[in-house]
Amino acid sequence: MPQRILMIDDERDLVFAVRLFLEGYGYELLAAYEGREAIELLETEDPLPDLVILDVYMPRLSGWDVLRMIRRSERTRSLPVIMLTAADKEADVARGHAEGVTWYQTKPFPNEDLLLIIERVLAMRGELPESPEP
């Protein structure tokens, strides 16, 4: 069964491009385009995704709000979260780590860097995909 990643980002073109790239490496990408949709998915999805990729700047519910909700829920608190965002100030990075992100990566980014980050985060949990080759 492929590793499942939930990407929460309102940039649909970015989500589409990341999906195409990661599927080539054997991952399954679920998508939510705003925070409420993501929280609903995390409350109902069974099994949970193996990893969450989360943007900060989104309508209605910011990535910070979503992150707090993930960390407060018994069901999702241990999910690894990669914050993938244009918020690149030192204070943003510090806030991300203080609020519980597993990895903080700024946009723009090379796809290969994102793949490496995903592999490292999953390796920390002992959850590497069976076949990470294209």
Image (spheres, rainbow, N blue to C red):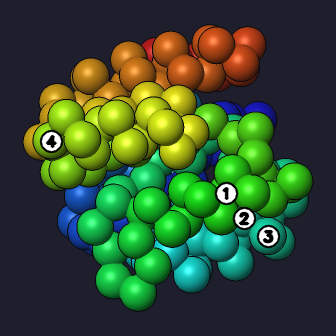
- Of tags 3 and 4, the one toward the viewer is 4
**Which percent across, then down, holds residue 133?**
46, 16
Query: Circle 3 sits on which residue?
Result: 43
CB within 8 Å, label 2 to label 3: yes
Dot 1 corresponds to which residue?
70
Residue found at x 27% / y 45%? 92
Neighbor class of circle 4 (other Cα within 10 Å; few <14, some 14-19, many 20+) is few
Residue 41 seen in the figure: yes
| Badge 2 density bin: few <14, some 14–19, many ≥20, Cα 10 Å | some
As helix, strand or loop, the secondary structure at mark 1 comes to helix
Quick one: 4 or 79, which is closer to the camera?
Answer: 79
- Work out which quarter of the rendered image holds the C terminus and state it: top left
Q: Mark 4 points at which residue?
A: 89
Q: How far apart in space, not on screen, are marks 3 and 4 (Cα)?
A: 31 Å
Asked if labels 1 and 2 touch by Cβ distance under 8 angstroms, the answer is: yes
Q: Which of marks 1 and 3 is nearer the N terminus?
A: 3
Q: Residue 42 carries which label?
A: 2
- Residue type pointed to by label 1: Ile
Say the numbered circle drawn on residue 35.
none
Amino acid at the residue labelled 2: Leu
Q: How far apart are marks 2 and 1 (CA)?
A: 8 Å
Identify the amino acid type marked 3: Glu
Between marks 4 and 2, how big is the CA–CA gap? Answer: 29 Å
